[in-house]
Each structure stands twice: as C-alpha cells, then as structure tokens.
Amino acid sequence: MSAHFGTRLRKGAVNTTVAALAVAALAASQAPDVTADGHGRQTAADAPSAADSGTGTESGATGNSPYYTDLPPLNSPNPAPSDSSSTAPAATGTNEAGIPATVLDAYKKAEAALAQAKPGCNMPWQLLAAIGNVESGQAGGGNVSADGTTITPILGPVLNGVGFANISDTDNGAYDGDSTYDRAVGPMQFIPSTWAWAGRDGNGDGKKDPNNIYDAALAAGHYLCRYDWDMSSTSGMRSAILSYNNSTDYLNTVLSWLEYYRKGTHEVPDGSGSVPGNRSDYGTGSTPTLPSVPTAPGTPGTPAKPSTPAKPATPAKPSTPPKPSPPAPTPTESVHHLEYTGTTRLTATAGSTYTDRVGARAETAAGKTVAKVRIRFTIVGDTDTTFTGGETVATIATDSKGVALAPALRAGEKTGDFTVRATVLGRTVTALDYKATVTARAADALARTGDAALTCTTGGEFATQVEVKATYKGAAAGKVAATATLVKSADDQSANDKGPYFKDAAGNPVRTLDLQTDANGLLTLPRLYADDTAGTYLLRVTTTGGATLTLELTVTAAATPDPTPDPAPSESASSPASTEPEPTTSGS
C-alpha cells in the first residue's frame, strides 16, 4: 500500500506540473485574458462559473459526468511552438500521443466541416481530440468499427443525483438504455437531451448516432462553436470547454491535452490506443485519498473498583416508530406550470438580431418559482431563423428567480411567422408558445449617387448607368428588394409602352425590372436604350419599405444629315444632240 501510495503522490506532482505548463503555454499563445497560479489553476478572480460560460445550464453537454483525469507526459511527442496549424511532420513516439486512425480521421473531418460551416469559430481538431481523450480515452483506445461506431457502448454513470447531476430520462432509453434516468453516451459523452438538438451526421450515413465518432466529433464541434465562441481566443475557448463540463479541473485537463497534441501526435491502429486509468469519480486523481492511520493502543492503568450494580429499571413501553417522511421532490418534479416572461410577440427584419429574448419562468402549483430546472426552447415552423450560434434548440436552466432566457434569436432571410416553444425537460407540463415574425428588409430613402445627365438620341444607348443608394434610418439598407419601372407619367405609374427600355436576357425590350440592393445598399441598374420616339420620360425606383426615387430621362431626335447637291452637268452632257444628218462629200 505504501509503495502504491507513493507512486500516486509522484504522479500527482508530475500532473500538476504538466497542467501548469499547459495553461501557461495556452495563455501565451492566445489572447491574454487567463491567469494561472503556480499550480496551473486559474486564480480565484478568474475562476469561471456556469454563468460565465454563457450557457446558463448546470449540466453541460455531458451532465457533468465523470471524466478521465490523467494528464500527458512532461516530454512532448514533438516539441514545437504552440500552433495548431503547424506543418511539422507527425511524431512517432509515446503511446499517450498516439490517436487511433479512425478516431483521428473523425476529428480532422470535423475540423474541415466546421471551417466551412462556422469559419469564425476557428476550431482546431486538437481540441476535439483533447476532449475525446478526457471523455472516453479516444473511444476506448479506438475500439470502433470501420464506420466509426463504438464496438462496445460507452456509457457514463446513472445521473440520479447521487454524486452527479439529477437528470430524469428524456429519451425513453433510446440512446442510453435507461428509461428512468439519463446517462452520458458515446465517445464524446453527450447526454440524450443535448444530443437531441446538437446531434450531427458526420459520416453521411443519414443517421445521427452519439455512439459514432464521426457523428459525435462533428456534434461536439458545433456544440463548442455555438454562441459565436472563437477558439482562437482564450476567453472563447474557456467558455466553450466549461459549457461542455463546468469544472475548472476539467478545463485544465483538456487544455493540457490540447497543448500536448498541438506539439505533435501520430496515428496508431484502431484498438491499440492508450486508455487512461484514472477518472474523476475514482478518487485516484491528482489529489490522493490518504490512507487511514490506526490508533495506538493506550497504556493500561489501574483497574477501577467495580461499582455496586444498580437496580434494574422498569422497561419502558416501546414507542411506535415514526413513519418515514417521503423524499422531497426534485426541482423538476415540483414544477407545476410555466409562465411567460416579457413579450410574447417578437418581430425583426430579415438578417437582424431580435431585440427581445424569449424567456420562461418555472413555478409550483402555489406560484413559487423553481430554480435549476432545465427549459428547452425549440424553434418551430418553416423558417431559417436560429438562435445565436446557428442552432434551433437550446436548453437553459432556470436561475434563482426561476427564469430561463433563451439565446438571442437571429432572423434568417425567409419572411413570415414561426413559433418558439418552451418545455420542461423531464416533466410533462403545458408548453409556452411565443409568436415571432420575420419581416422583409426595408429602405426608407433612395438617392442617386451621380449627377450626370441622363440623355440619349433615338435608337441609341444611354451613356450613363443609373446607380442609387438605399438607406434605412440613415444606415445602408442592404439586400432590399427594389423595382425599377419606366412609367407613363407622374400621375400614371403603369409601365410605358414606348420610349427608353431595358433588355432582358434575350435582348428583348422590358420596362419593369425586379432588383435587389447589394450589402452596402447600392443598386446599379442595367443599361438603358432608346427607341425611335423622342421626348422626356420618367424612371421610377421603389423599394420594400416605401422608398421612392423618380428620375427624368431625355431622348432627342437623331440629327438629320444635310442633303448632298447634284454634281454640275458637263458641256457635252448639256448640249442637245443634233438631229440633222451630217453632209457627205461627193467623190466626183
């Protein structure tokens, strides 16, 4: 026992050093907003909480399930600057640095997909690898099939509130096989309620399976990138990791492996990866459990003189044991209904962020607020509006006042109505529906950007193209629908049947066009042509929102060339021909 305990103490000291080095290296390589003490821990002033992470949830992606606490060796596999984009050759070395081939491929494919879907997140595959190692030891050392599905299911402990979060069943056991409580599932350890909205199909087989490393790695990347968090900044990465598992120890462990993998790693065959040996619920992490010390026997003293035995008392009548009290209901079980908070009708212009946020308050039957209840907000309807970060579902825990606020809504381009629905996870109560509307982008003013005269001769082409700028409340109105029409008159706004015209793709004359301003509110009209009718004409441009601009076009008759005079007649041509016969000369 003493030899084993000494080994654990030495390992704890090494792990503490590694954590300190990793956090320091990460802070140096990113934005300078993390500080660390001498043991690699964040200082008290900087220690994040669930609120700091921006999620408002108490259980994260994993339900704060246990994780592997092993830290990487002090010697990196391939010492190099802390740069996730390094082109240094992959190292071949310690088993800890090796990542099973299929698992490594899944991380890199997820990085590539996120670079396209969420380029502002700057997700490095090494972060996914760090979380995958801490959550499941790289899917149990790469114990996966060719398509990336775990051969043996990876399940966290039952989340029944005994040492862990208390999360009642949300999937009827579909993912975790437990219809009473939830459990974290798969190589990235998602709880079913989070997988329900965060799940992705990473290997293109048409399914979203938390037990598949391709699906799980891509889902983890999207989960970490929500709320527009940027992994190239320390604050963004910290918030993202803490939203996965709200523990500073977890944060530091993940950062240690991230830094280790950034310095180099190598591929190993599936099934041959190193599986960590210590987990946060084993009691064998960096803080060892001290062995008990037996109490030394006391010094025997002089035996006391035996006392006279007392007269036995009359036995008391046995009392009836009290009935055991029923267990107190959990916060979720005590919720009777949800109440609206704030406005129940939201409106925003396409492409903008809604000013108001959807919220719900959990209450008991007596109207008392209930904290720490998970509320799921779901966007329902034919819309491309999402919550900040691009998701359509968000799960938020109620605060001390029983209120949960959904992330801000970001309107898409599809106009119309939709619904945001609030429900209680783990309990059936009447849902709350919030009505929301996306209105078309609009402009309230139009102005021409140039002042050149718009003139042309009959049958010709206008030299100047018309360009206008649309604004809304003084700001550029981008992507606003507009219509350009050559009208008959100021009083008759119908399209003219003569005068200037545009050309369609086939070159045919058209006098009405549907257009759209660019991102800067600018609209350049196609070239104008004139027919053979001279005169003054009107071009009218209108936009959604009522902005109107009328421009005058002038068509003048083409100049007629001077007639060329007939040439002067020649003398021979002007003399009349003689009709008299010429005299002949006699030969006699």
Image (tube, rainbow, N blue to C red):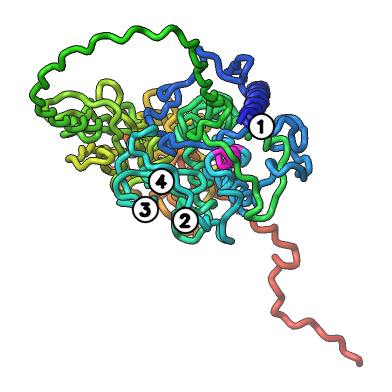
| On-image quarter of the C terminus | bottom right
- Residue type at mark 2: give it: Asp
Q: Earlier in the sequence, mark 1 or mark 3?
A: 3
SS under mark 2: loop
Residue 454 to residue 570: above or below: above
Q: Which residues are magenta?
A: 127-134
C-alpha gap between disc 2 and disc 1: 59 Å
Please determine whether, in this image, residue 195 is positioned above or below residue 343: below
Residue 259 bears which disc, if any?
A: 1
Majority secondary structure in the magenta region: helix
The residue labelled by disc 4 is 195
Per the image, the residue denoted by label 3 is 177
Counting residues from the N terminus, which is met first, the one under dot 2 or under dot 3? 3
Q: Position of residue 116 (x, y in %)?
A: 56, 45
Displayed quadrant of residue 374:
top left
Q: Position of residue 536 (x, y in %)?
A: 40, 40
Q: Residue at x 62, y 47 (%)?
A: 108
Q: Nearer the viewer, residue 140 or 82?
A: 140
Viewer-side label of 2, 1: 1
The span from disc 1 to disc 4 (Cα, nearest Å) is 27 Å
Circle 4 residues within 10 Å: few <14, some 14–19, many ≥20: many
State the separation of the CA atoms marked 1 and 3: 36 Å
Q: Are marks 1 and 3 in contact (CB under 8 Å)?
A: no
Q: Nearer the viewer, mark 1 or mark 3?
A: 3
